[in-house]
Image (spheres, rainbow, N blue to C red):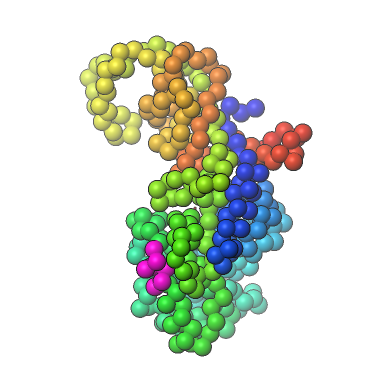
Amino acid sequence: MNGLRLEVDLDKVGDNTAQLVTRARQRGLSITATTKAMLGAPELAHVISAAGAVSLGDSRIENVERMIDAGIDHPMLLLRSPMPSQVDRVVRAGVTSLNTETQVLTALAAAARAQGRIHDVILMVELGDLREGLMPEQLDQAVSHVLGLPTLRLHGIGANLACRNGIEPTVENMGELSAIVDSVEAAFSVEIDLVSGGNSANLDWAFGASAIGRINNLRLGESILLGTEPLHRRPIPGLHTDAFTLIAEVIESQRKPTMPWGRSGQNSFGETVEAEDRGSVWQTILAIGRQDTDPTDMAAPDGVEILAASSDHLVVETRDRMCPGDEIRFVPGYSALLRSMTSPFVAKLLCQSDEDDLPGRGIP
Ligand SMILES: *Cc1c(COP(=O)(O)O)cnc(C)c1O
């Protein structure tokens, strides 16, 4: 077995999904569960679909195609605006795409016409976080553009907060989104099916006491996978926060001073390190590095302290000498999880307890 591996307990992810779906339903919200942090792993898609997510969301068409090729036929949203070079693939995949650019909408409509299809779109509105979204005063023009393209269908309106600037979803900005939806419906005599209010950062707002207004959908990733909300990275009560474990193998463990010696310049990442003399310690090296994870975003077990990381080495302090071949288990945060999923050097083991008699299935 590969010493460097990410173990995923899919039962816990399924449980988290089911709980969030139930709580959201009580507030009139459906859940789109995102698969992008796991490269659209079909096993994940099965579990979260079975747990009640109305649709799957992924930011990359490659992941969407992977799920479709694996036979997943749940509705899907493409969360990132399509690249103009990929509009044919986006239309062919039959997903709903999130959009902000009339030029891209025109290209999607042309691709849909060529393929004899209708393509569903959601228009994204900027509410202050300054990532994707049309400025609100620009929305009417985009709506009329979509309505004028017969191969497009306006499926919904959405917004995304807390991703770039950490702007929180509040009664005010969610109220603004509701008002925008009302005004589009009134101005164009249309009905907007889906009003997608945001991501895991919306959960405090969603489960709070305030009115939900027109919002009827959230797109959740981190909360389902890690059981945390991203605004303060607090565990969500009742959810599993240990569905993912990142396991690395010891390759060296030596008693060493904490003070480096010799003349010092920058390290391999252009950083200048200020060392503190704490005498000598058990310095243990694990065969995992910045290429495989985000070493600043993982929780180490008791008795292990992360000191530094380079491309391929993680330097930790341990209470005692460890033997080469020993393993240490970490709990990754979202950033560490993303990077581990995309490192070809990290084996992925997806486990489900109803298959306990089988070894964890590896995915390539
Ligand atoms: C990634 C993403 C989500 C999910 O975000 P989480 O914080 O993981 O819940 C929702 N919407 C969009 C547009 C995204 O890109």
**Which range is magenta?**
170-176
Query: Which quadrant holds residue 71?
Result: bottom right
**Predominant secondary structure in magenta?**
helix
- Residue 207 in the image: above or below residue 112: above
The C terminus lies in quadrant:
top right
Residue at 64% over, 76% down: 117
Image coordinates of residue 27 in percent, x first then y, are 55, 65
Position of 128 compared to 228: left or right?
Answer: left
State whether residue 19 is above or below residue 328. below
Magenta stretch: includes residue 55: no
Where 136 sits versus 200, above or below? Answer: below
Residue 250, image x and y in percent? 51, 21
Can residue 235 be seen from the camera position used here? yes
Residue shown at the point (41%, 20%) measured from the top left: 317
User: Which residue is found at the position 34% from the left and 56% from the top?
Assistant: 165
Q: Which of the 4 image quarters holds residue 175?
A: bottom left
Which residue is outermost to the right? 357
Residue found at the very far left of the displayed protein:
263
Q: Quadrant of residue 362?
A: top right
Which of the two residues, 206 or 289, is positioned nearer the viewer here?
A: 206
Place of residue 178 in the rendered image (x, y in percent of width and height, measured from the top left): 45, 74
The percent position of residue 145, horizontal first and vertical second, equals 47, 82
Which residue is at 48% across, 27% downward?
Answer: 301
Mark count? 0
Q: In the current view of this chain or complex, which residue is farthest to the front? A: 209
358 left or right, relative to 33: right
Residue 346, can we see it?
no
Instruction: Tell me the quarter of the image containing the N terminus.
Output: top right
